């Protein structure tokens, strides 16, 4: 700190250090001061005075701004009912009371629709619940005790960096690291074996591996009999897929597939780390379910260093939801898949009333939502009053009618629970509020009282927040003792009989659906560019996370290079050289970018970084322009990585 400003952010050392992070933090968060003190920081409420997106604002007092927002919400509800007010709430991994407490409670009390957070993690979470119920994740540091770590569809080198030293410790002790990813990521570069399948073909690979274990007598039959239901139909499906067919469909060497089968079949302990890349396809649910099922077939549970590492954030035990008032009936609420919000706002999906107010908090859908062109039209719709509560002037905030200033976590008291380790922390302000920033909960409280809800039910005062968290301060830190979270020993499936499940005959996805690349009939719309010509030699476009941004956070201060990464072979086939301008297009639109020849990409795939802002390309769109708003086969998840584009030299 210098003169009330943050000048450096780093990990705690000494007695305050979290053992998992071990005194260091990733470079994204090290640069957080640039956002806290950004020249684009919103410091007062703003009311639009010019055309949307023109940047013409006037400063407003908080009372005036809240009166205006509450008034428009009241008018909409009075005229059309609560379905005319759509809350687009995300907040991702931010402070827990900020994201879970009074803002969702406000819209629930009003009976406004619930926008389901299906844009990320919904499908993999649903696959976990389908197979294991509420069983806890394996403890991430336990991987140091494993003989095998299989990282499938994620890149901890940029999105879970604190796990890398534990992977390194495993390898130093003689363990093997395997990565399955279409790109040779930073994690894959560290691996002993890297398989780079065609994007979206993970289900057939996982099933074929399980089938091979059965065919060769190496499936853990004793574990399956003791702990797993739905084995017979799963086995029939898996055994119908030979390894050579999977290798052909996935376009990976058969020798690599055989090597992976041998590694999975070897005695454990062995830990699986599935990632959200698995779910971002039309068959994303099948991918997730198949990969999780492989670990059940192999029986890699019951000892330290084994199991599946997924989210760890649910063990803090701190109540986050606001208490529902006694004697008040809960209003029935409609639900909207987050990936379809733009259609609802534009009146293109069935909806009982016109949308008159859209309230955005903790999100930047102008650049993070699927079908970006449609979302931008929805955000710019004149008939919809757009309110954005935000820290800096994002691309979404620029389109708003009212912008409300939000604080960063350096300016508030709250708690955060890690989803990469079993720990939580309670934190207090280290700097005064920047400008007139108010928390999500304070804004919700201000709106609630203006809409006739009780002030004591919406008490967001700092003293009340401190009192809520006080009983939990003493036990903040690690929530599980080392070595105490072994799956099928210390934590078990919460499904009937305490058993896991492979086939789910009555569920949304009874068994994984296996298809070759490009065979899904609903994919055809992506194959035709705006010219109407069929795509020739189409490439699958990925939009991976980067070391610079957290979704779109820091896209203003430290964006990744706005380039189209393409394999040298695919570039040569198209007459593209490194540094040349290329046109990328499909039915939803086109962009021009600079080509970056990247040998880390497999043939048939290209990539534009996730989280870029409009300014990075200066063409009114980013990578999500090409992503249709189709949803996948489990929990309605987004299909960010199931996109076909044509790449040609720019005219």
Image (cartoon, helix red, strand yellow):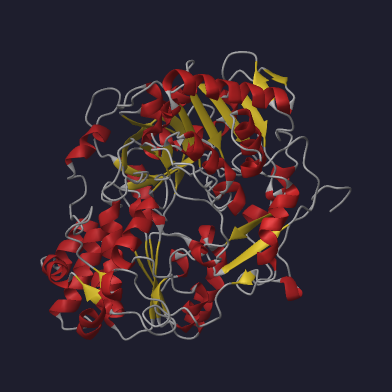
Q: Nearer the viewer, residue 564 or 479?
A: 479
169 over 541 or under it: above or below? below
* Location of residue 75 in the rendering, given as x and y in whole percent from the top left corner: 52, 19
Quarter of the rendering occupied by the C terminus: top left
Which residue is found at the position 72% from the left and 26% from the top?
63
Which residue is found at the position 16% from the left and 83% from the top?
217
Which residue is found at the position 55% from the left and 76% from the top?
480
For the question of whether residue 138 can be seen, the reply is yes
Quarter of the rendering occupied by the N terminus: bottom right
* Location of residue 596 in the rendering, given as x and y in whole percent from the top left corner: 47, 44
* Location of residue 266 in the rendering, given as x and y in whole percent from the top left corner: 30, 84
Q: Quadrant of residue 446?
A: top right
Q: Nearer the viewer, residue 250 or 208?
A: 208
Q: Nearer the viewer, residue 143 or 577?
A: 143
Question: With 178 as the anchor, is 106 left or right in this view?
Answer: right
Tell me how many marks there are: 0
């Amino acid at each position: 700190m210098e003169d009330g400003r943050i000048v450096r952010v780093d990990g705690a050392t000494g007695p305050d250090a979290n053992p998992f992070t071990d005194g260091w933090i990733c470079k994204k968060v090290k640069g957080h001061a640039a956002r806290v003190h950004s020249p684009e920081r919103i410091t007062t409420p703003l009311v639009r005075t010019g055309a949307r997106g023109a940047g013409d604002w006037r400063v407003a007092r908080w009372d005036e701004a809240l009166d205006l927002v509450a008034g428009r919400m009241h008018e909409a509800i009075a005229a059309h009912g609560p379905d005319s007010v759509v809350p687009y709430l995300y907040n991702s991994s931010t402070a827990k009371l900020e994201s879970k407490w009074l803002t969702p409670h406000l819209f629930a009390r009003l009976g406004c629709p619930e926008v389901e957070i299906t844009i990320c993690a919904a499908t993999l979470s649903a696959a976990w619940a389908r197979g294991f119920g509420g069983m806890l994740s394996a403890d991430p540091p336990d991987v140091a005790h494993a003989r095998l770590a299989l990282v499938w569809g994620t890149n901890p080198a940029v999105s879970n960096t604190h796990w890398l030293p534990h992977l390194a410790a495993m390898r130093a002790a003689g363990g093997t690291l395997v990565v399955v990813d279409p790109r040779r990521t930073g994690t894959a570069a560290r691996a002993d074996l890297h398989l780079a399948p065609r994007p979206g073909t993970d289900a057939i690979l996982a099933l074929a591996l399980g089938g091979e274990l059965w065919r060769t007598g190496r499936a853990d039959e004793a574990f399956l009999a003791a702990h797993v239901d739905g084995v017979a139909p799963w086995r029939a499906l898996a055994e119908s897929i030979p390894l050579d067919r999977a290798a052909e469909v996935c376009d990976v060497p058969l020798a690599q597939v055989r090597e992976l089968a041998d590694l999975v079949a070897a005695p454990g302990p062995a830990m699986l780390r599935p990632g959200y890349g698995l779910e971002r396809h039309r068959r994303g649910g099948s991918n997730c379910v198949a990969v999780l099922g492989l670990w059940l077939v192999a029986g890699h549970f019951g000892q330290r260093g084994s199991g599946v590492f997924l989210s760890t954030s649910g063990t803090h035990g701190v109540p986050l939801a606001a208490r529902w008032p006694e004697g008040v009936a809960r209003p029935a609420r409609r639900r909207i898949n987050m990936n379809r919000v733009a259609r609802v706002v534009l009146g293109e999906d069935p909806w009982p009333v016109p949308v008159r107010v859209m309230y955005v908090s903790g999100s930047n859908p102008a650049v993070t939502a699927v079908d970006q062109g449609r979302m931008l039209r929805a955000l710019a719709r004149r008939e919809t009053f757009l309110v954005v509560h935000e820290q800096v002037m994002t691309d979404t905030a620029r389109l708003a009618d009212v912008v409300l200033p939000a604080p960063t976590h350096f300016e508030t008291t709250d708690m955060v629970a890690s989803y990469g380790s079993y720990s939580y922390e309670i934190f207090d302000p280290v700097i005064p509020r920047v400008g007139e920033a108010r928390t999500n909960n304070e804004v919700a409280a201000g709106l609630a009282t203006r809409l006739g809800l009780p002030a004591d039910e919406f008490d967001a005062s700092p003293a009340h927040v401190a009192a809520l968290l006080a009983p939990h301060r003493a036990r903040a830190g690690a929530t599980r003792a080392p070595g105490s979270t072994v799956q099928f020993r210390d934590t078990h499936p919460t499904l009937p009989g305490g058993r896991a499940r492979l086939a789910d005959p009555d569920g949304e996805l009874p068994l994984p659906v296996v298809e070759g690349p490009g065979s899904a009939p609903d994919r055809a719309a992506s194959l035709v560019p705006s010219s109407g010509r069929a795509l020739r030699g189409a490439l699958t476009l990925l939009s991976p996370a980067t070391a610079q941004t957290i979704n779109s956070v820091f896209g203003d201060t430290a964006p990744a290079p706005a380039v189209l990464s393409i394999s040298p072979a695919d570039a040569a086939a198209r007459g593209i050289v490194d540094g040349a301008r290329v046109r990328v297009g499909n039915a939803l639109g086109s962009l021009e970018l600079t080509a970056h020849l990247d040998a880390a990409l497999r043939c048939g795939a290209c990539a534009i970084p996730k989280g870029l802002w409009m300014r990075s390309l200066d063409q009114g769109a980013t990578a999500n322009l090409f992503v249709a708003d189709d949803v996948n086969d489990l929990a309605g998840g987004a299909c960010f990585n199931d996109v076909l584009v044509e790449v040609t030299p720019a005219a």
